[in-house]
């Protein structure tokens, strides 16, 4: 693959991957030419161990794809293990990076080459930029439909951060980088906002709601995450937020396993635990009726619309493209 690395700035791509073989090769194809290095952290966090091999590794072809990728310029480093959470995984890839900017990429995110060039040009000409966010185009059940949030702003996703040794991620949701030397959060210091990039037609292309495998594993993971780590369905948590001992007691009580069915009921305004049966499995037969009653994503207020744009070039090598655009 052609190498288009830039002499002015070095872009280090960081990835956390697990059971992501559906579009992993296309993701790598979209970023490889521009990478100073790509550090991939592979393996399950504690909420995904039920989907993993005993050693925490992916059960699909994820590792095979990474190890067999044509890495002509020796850019790819693979780190495997079991992880507590995704923030830990992000901080793990930082240990091996030497670039000027960190660009976080998930294994189902694909960029147009021209868009990456434009973003790099922004960074070269504006060295004071400390972080970059994107809007994304989220495909649904193929490449013909995308999801659209109803009566709400698009979600801004942080992906690029100015980097120096010692900086670290404080959270994964959203990705947030902190510089302890200056005590500054890169996201807030001098960001290039998603709205500016969207005005130039720059997005990333998200392929997370395409296959039955993706949806099955996504629902298992987010159910585990919401009930084990989040406050899903737990009432009055904010009320007690100023009284930490009371809040801890309240959370401990509501994490009793016997209360999980009740918590799911109380949480259904924000997350559809029956998404597979109520939406995913029936949408193809009756899209209009399904969208009349439910969001097309597990979270509220999403519908579908036809996609009329141009796809990233690396996606055109995927079998899905051949099926959709014969």
Image (cartoon, rainbow, N blue to C red):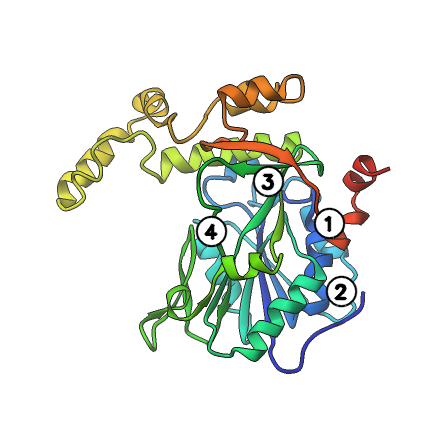
- Is 232 on the left or on the right of 244, as rendered? right
Which residue lies under the disc numbered 4? 86
Q: Quickly name the residue at label 1.
A: 310
**Distance from Cα at disc 4 to Cα at disc 2:** 25 Å
Residue extending farthest to the bottom is: 8
Do the residues bearing badges 1 and 4 touch, measured as CB atoms within 8 Å?
no
Earlier in the chain: of badge 3 and badge 4, it is 3
Q: Nearer the viewer, residue 46 or 311?
A: 311
Tell me whether circle 4 and circle 2 mark residues in contact (CB < 8 Å).
Answer: no
> Dividing the picture into quarters, in which one does residue 271 lie?
top left
Residue 31 sits above or below residue 153 on the image = below
In contact (CB < 8 Å): disc 3 and disc 2: no
Between circles 3 and 2, the one closer to the viewer is 2
Give the Cα distance between marks 1 and 2. 27 Å
- Compared with 298, 42 (above or below) is below
| Mark in front: 3 vs 1 | 1
State which quadrant residue 69 falls in. Answer: bottom right
Q: Disc 2 on helix, strand or loop? A: loop
Report crowding for label 4: few under 14, some 14 to 19, many 20 or more residues within 10 A (C-alpha): some
Q: Tell me: residue 43, above or below residue 191.
A: above
Which element type, helix, strand or loop, lies under badge 3? loop
Nearest the viewer among 153 and 219 is: 153
Residue 289, label in figure: none
- Decide if residue 247 is on the left or right side of residue 95: left
Residue 71: numbered disc: 2
Q: Which image quarter holds the C terminus? A: top right
Q: First in sequence, mark 4 or 2: give its number.
A: 2
Alpha carbons under labels 3 and 4: distance apart: 18 Å
- The local secondary structure at tag 1 comes to loop
Residue 241 on image: x %, y %: 18, 44
């Amino acid at each position: 693959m052609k190498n288009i690395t830039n002499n002015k700035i070095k872009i280090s791509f960081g990835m956390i991957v697990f059971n992501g073989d559906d579009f992993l090769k296309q993701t790598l194809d979209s970023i490889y030419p521009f990478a100073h290095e790509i550090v991939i952290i592979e393996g399950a966090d504690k909420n995904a161990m039920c989907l993993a091999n005993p050693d925490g590794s992916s059960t699909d072809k994820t590792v095979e794809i990474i190890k067999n990728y044509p890495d002509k310029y020796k850019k790819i480093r693979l780190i495997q293990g079991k992880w507590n959470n995704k923030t830990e995984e992000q901080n793990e890839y930082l240990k091996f990076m030497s670039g000027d900017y960190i660009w976080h990429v998930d294994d189902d995110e694909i960029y147009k080459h021209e868009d990456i060039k434009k973003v790099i040009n922004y960074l070269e000409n504006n060295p004071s930029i400390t972080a970059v966010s994107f809007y994304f185009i989220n495909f649904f059940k193929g490449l013909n439909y995308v999801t659209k949030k109803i009566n709400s702003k698009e979600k801004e996703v942080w992906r690029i951060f100015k980097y120096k040794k010692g900086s670290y991620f404080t959270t994964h949701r959203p990705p947030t980088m902190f510089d302890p030397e200056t005590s500054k959060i890169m996201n807030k210091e001098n960001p290039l906002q998603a709205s500016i990039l969207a005005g130039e037609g720059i997005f990333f292309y998200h392929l997370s709601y395409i296959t039955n495998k993706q949806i099955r594993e996504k629902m298992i993971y987010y159910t585990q995450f919401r009930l084990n780590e989040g406050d899903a369905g737990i009432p009055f948590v904010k009320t007690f937020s100023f009284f930490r001992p009371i809040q801890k007691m309240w959370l401990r009580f509501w994490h009793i396993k016997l209360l999980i069915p009740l918590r799911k009921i109380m949480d259904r305004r924000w997350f559809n635990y029956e998404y597979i049966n109520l939406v995913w499995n029936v949408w193809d037969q009756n899209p209009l009726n399904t969208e009349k009653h439910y969001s097309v994503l597990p979270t509220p207020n999403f519908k579908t619309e036809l996609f009329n744009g141009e796809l990233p070039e690396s996606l055109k090598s995927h079998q899905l493209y051949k099926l959709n655009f014969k």
